[in-house]
Each structure stands twice: as C-alpha cells, then as structure tokens.
Image (cartoon, rainbow, N blue to C red):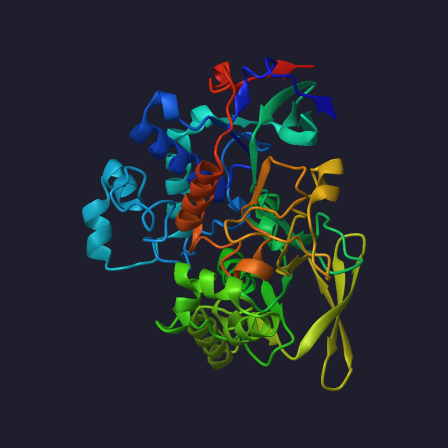
Amino acid sequence: MSQALPGDAPLIHDLIGIGFGPSNVAMAIALSEHNARVGRQEAVTAHFFERQSGFGWHRGMLIDDATMQVSFLKDLVTLRNPSSEYTFLRYLQSKGRLIDFVNHKNLFPLRVEFHDYFEWAAAKVDDMVSYGHEVVAVEPVVRDGVVEYVDVTARSGSETVVHRARNLVIGTGLRPLMPEGVERTDRVWHNSDLLAKVEGLQGAEPERFIVVGAGQSAAENVAYLHRRFPGAEVCAVFSRYGYSPADDSSFANRIFDPAAVDEYFTAPDDIKRRLMDYHGNTNYSVVDIDLIDDLYRQAYQEKVLGTERLRFLNVSRLTGVTETEDKVRATVTSLVTGEEKELDADVVVLATGYSPADPLGLLGELGDRCHRDGQGRVRVERDYRVMTDAGLRCGIYLQGGTEHTHGITSSLLSNTAIRVGEILQSVLDRGLGRVQGASRPVADGIGSVR
C-alpha cells in the first residue's frame, strides 16, 4: 500500500480498464465521444490494458458461415448513440458494403464480419490501450486515511508499468469451462480452440470426432466438422433428447431490454431465480432452429443414402476420457439404462461453456474491502459499481460477473452500449476529484517503469 501526497499525482487517470474485449472497447468509445463533446478541460482521461497482442474475440469460433445471435443494431454504440461514427452501419459504409447488407435483408451478420467490425472500432480508439500488457497487481493508494486511488501494475515481457487511477473498469471476460478432471490436450479440445486446433490436422484424415454439448457452439462444431472432414464420422453427445431451439420471439427478447435490467435489479431473489428459469432458453444450452433443421435434414439424408456419418448420442453424457497412443477413448453413458459405450476418436471437442473469471481476483487486499452476499457473490450497485467499505473511495466497476444482480445480459452484447454509458455517467456523477495538475493524461499511455 502506498501513501498519496497532495502534490504527487500529475499522472493520474480518471479511469483504467482491465481487458479490451467488446465491453471495454465500447467503454473507450463512450469516453472518446464524451471527450469530443466537452473539450479538453473536462475530458475524462483513461487507459486500458489488454494481455492479447491485438484485439481478439472468440477467434476460435469464427466459423465461416456462423452468424450472430444478436441484431447488428445491438452493436457497441447504437442503442446509446444512433448517430455515432462507431456504429456497425458506419463500418459497412467504410467497407463499401452498406447497400449490399441492406439488400441482404438480414438482422444477423456473419460472426466473422462482426468481429471485423469490432477490430475496426477498436482501431479507432487504440490510443487508449496498451496491447500485450497483462495486469498482475492492483494496489491501494491511501490519502488522508482513505483509498483514493489504485496503482495498476501491468507486465509486458520483462518490463512492468504502473499507472494510477481514480476508477477501475474490469472487463476480463469469460474462461473456458472444462468438465472436472478433464484437461485440454492435442486430442481433447475446448470449442473455443476449434479453428486453431483444426489447422493442426491439416493433411490428416481423421476418422471420428466426438462433440459434447447441447448449445449453439456444440451444434456449430458438429456442422463444421462434418462439412470440413467429409470422410469422418461426427458423434454429438448430449443429455437432452434433442437440441432445444432458442426462444428469440419478440416478447421473450424483452428480457434483454435495458428496462429489464432495472426490473431484475430491484426484484426479490426468488423472482430473480424465476426469471432466469423462465428465460434461460433465450441464451443457455439452446440452438438456432435453422441449424437444428439443417442437422436433422443432413442426418435423414444420410440414412436414406446409407452413408451415416452424423450420429446423435442423445440422453447420454460423457463419463470418461482416456488418451491412447494415437486416439482418445471416450466413455459415453446412457442416462436411461446406464449402459456404457466406449468410442475411439481422433478428437473430443468439449462445447461445455464458459465461467466468469473472479471479478475481484486481481484486487489483492482491496478485494477484502468489497462486499459479498450470503452466497459469496460480489454485491454490485445498479451502476455496476462494486459495493465497498466507506474507506475505499476509488470506484470499481464490473463489465461481466453481474448476472446475479443485473440479469442475463451481464456478459452479453445486448446491453453493452447502454451499460458503458451508465458506468461513464456514474463516474461523472461521483466526481473526478481531481487535484491541481492531476487531470493531464499520461504521455503515450505509460506511467513509471520498474
């Protein structure tokens, strides 16, 4: 812990963001637009750290024909500022595809195209980010007995940099979730690694893939591998009787509305649980109906032709994975009969979802000042600010990890544009608390070097 003196803070950021995925790119855009409106004297100074060497969002799942499950209008900015220069439509215009997209009559772009939009937007605010910098420590800075600032230490190679801030915005994303006791290897993949791992099979002739999971990613993996390797069998393993269609009907989609966040936040805990039970099928372990129909059509066609490469092992679960010299042996158990079936495959792909990173994992001793509920979950205010002891004046905001307080949109794109505007407004409403000389941005985005 360091002691802040009145005159030692000429390089204090108003805000530091940890992670530079879509949520914090949207945060940087909101800051950039705010600063353009108010001018230099009232500008909010900010910097972001991203451990990747450049922008990247689920690169392993950018399958060539996979589409977004969210409307292009729910981009990084439109719902907050439709006239912004950072909208998906402005991106299309810059690429010369606006008219073509309009003629396409489709709300849901290709995922690879939306990723390119994210990269395009991130490049417009890349003066705010240090790529290739992993945040390794966050330490409190005390002034007059109160934690007024935090020092953020980031490592790049053998060097570290330290930046000081009045507010933190943590957007570290999700982590691939593997079944207990199963490790990722060259033959056991998480679906997030799909495209990178497939490249390693170039020139090989795999005979069988096993894909575990019942959600959109699992179904996309099955369809992709079946198409990419025409000589291989693809076995889908899931505990349901069949893939369940996603409920994207107009009324159900209201669960993603900004107003739904207000309602969810103020609802009693039992109502929160009920809402998640009612509407989990808008997002979790569900598949687009068009993809379900395509897979069924393909499976039926193969039955007719007598060349079945697409197999569905339903009402079953994976109960064991053992690697042999040149294969991986999967044990699949029927949930109805308990019968075990062993299948040798070239690869097992686990589309088993993601878990949120501990949002306070980087905060060290500061984490002890953050409040948790009876279940150990972080207490979060409506403005996405973590509830803390009175002695911690620095604001800590979360982009993700707030599903228990803010509902299903916590880690989704649907409310990103609105959420960053609310966080920015909260930072402004709470005041920037600048002292003389403390409002200047750090030159080149670099503080002290250790």
Residue 32, given in percent of the width and then of the height, sits at: 37, 31
- Could you tell me which quadrant the N terminus lies in? top right
Q: Which residue is pictured at 68% across the width and 48% down the height?
A: 358
Against 389, residue 129 (above or below) is above
Q: Which residue is pictured at 75% across the width and 43% down the height?
A: 368
User: In the image, is 332 to the left or to the right of 387?
Assistant: right
Q: Is residue 257 visible?
A: no
Q: Which residue is pictured at 33% across the width and 53% down the height?
A: 72
Against 351, residue 422 (above or below) is above
Count of picture labels: 0
User: In the image, is 62 to the left or to the right of 124?
Assistant: right
User: In the image, is 45 to the left or to the right of 385?
Assistant: left
Q: Is residue 123 visible?
A: yes
Furthest-bottom residue in this view = 337
Q: Can you tell which quarter of the image residue 273 is in?
A: bottom right
- Could you tell me which quadrant the C terminus lies in? top right
Residue 356, given in percent of the width and then of the height, sits at: 63, 52
Q: Which residue is pictured at 29% across the width and 40% down the height?
A: 91
Closer to us: 425 or 318? 425
Furthest-front residue in this view = 144
User: In the image, is 353 to the left or to the right of 406?
Assistant: right
Q: Can you tell which quarter of the image residue 66 is in?
A: bottom left
Closer to us: 153 or 345? 153
Residue 349, given in percent of the width and then of the height, sits at: 64, 58
Residue 149, given in percent of the width and then of the height, sits at: 62, 28
Q: Can you tell which quarter of the image residue 235 is in?
A: bottom right
